[in-house]
Amino acid sequence: MKSAIVKLSILFVILFGVLGQAYGVRIKDIADIKGVRQNQLVGYGLVVGLNGTGDSDDAIFTIQSFASMLERMGVTVRPEDIEVDNVAAVIVTTDLPAFARSGGRIDVLVSSIGDAQNLQGGTLLFTPLKGADGQVYAIAQGPVSTGGFAAGSDSGSGVQKNHPTAGRVVNGAIIEKEIATNFNNKQSLTLNLHRADFTTASRVAQAINIAFYDQIARTHDAGTIEVQVPEKYKGNTVALVTMIERLGVTPDIVSKVVINEF
C-alpha cells in the first residue's frame, strides 16, 4: 500500500512538472529566430511648404541641397539667390520589417538637422532610404505629421508643446527592394533567448524534443538553442516554426527579496 502511494505521488509530481512546463509562456514570447529581424534604413531629404519656419540662410547644406534638386529638375539658380525659410533639411529613418515585400508601405520618422523651428504643415520630398550596405530599399515622400506645435508673436511671447522639429509620414515609404532570404529551405534554426539563462535554454530544448519525439534541439550556451529541421519539414520550415513558437515552457526566475518599509 505504501509503495503504491509513493509511486502515485511520483506520478503526480511528474505530471504537474510536465503540465507546468506545457502551460508556461510560449517560446514565441521569450525567444527570436536568428536572422528574422528588422533592418534600419536612413536617408537625407528636404521638407518643403513650411510657413517661414524652415532653416535659415546659415544652414548652407539646405541651400546646396535645394539648388541641386532644382538643377536636376532643369532649373538653374545660384545658391546665393535662394532663401530657404520654407524649406528644412531632414534625416529620414525607418525600420524595414522582416520579409517585407516590394510595393508594401511603412511609416518613416522625419527629424530636422538644421535650425528649422517647426515642420508642421510640410511635405517630405522624394527621399531614397538606404541600408547599411548602401543600397536603396525604400523611397519616402508625403505630408509630415508632427506630435507637437509651436506658436509665437512678434512681441517674443510664445508656446511650444513637445518637439515640432520631428514628425512622422504615415505609410510614407514604398518598399522598392526585398531582402533576399531562403528561410523556407533552411536545414537548421537558431533560437536566441531574450534573456540568457542556462535553465530556461535547457527547458526550451527539452520542450521541443518532447513535442517532436526526437532529439532535434540542443543548447549551445545560455542564450542559444539550435534546432535541426526534421525530414518531414524540409522545404516547409514555416510550419516547423509555427509548431515551435506555440510550445509552452516555464522560464527560470531569479528569486527576489522585497522589503516593505512599513
Image (tube, rainbow, N blue to C red):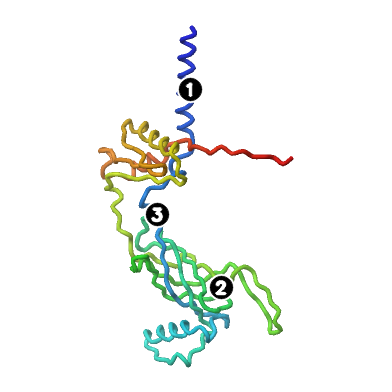
Which of disc 3 and disc 1 is earlier in sequence? 1
On screen, residue 133 versus residue 106, left or right, reads left
* Residue type for callout 3: Arg
> Is 15 in front, or is 87?
15
Label 2 Cα neighbours within 10 Å, binned few <14 / some 14-19 / many ≥20: many
Q: Residue at x 38, y 36 (%)?
A: 205
* Label 3: which secondary element: loop
**Relative to 160, residue 64 above or below:** below
Q: Amino acid at mark 2?
A: Thr
At label 1, counting other C-alpha atoms closer than 10 Å, the crowd grade (few under 14, some 14-19, many 20 or more) is: few
Discs 1, 3 touching: Cβ within 8 Å: no
Number of the front mark, 1 or 3: 1
Q: Please provide percent x and percent y for residue 135.
A: 33, 68
Residue 239 as seen in the image, left or right of residue 89: left
Marking on residue 165: 2
Horizontal and vertical percent position of residue 254: 53, 39
Residue 256 numbered mark, or none: none
Residue under label 1, please give it: 13
Tell me the quarter of the image containing the C terminus.
top right
| Residue wearing tag 3 | 37
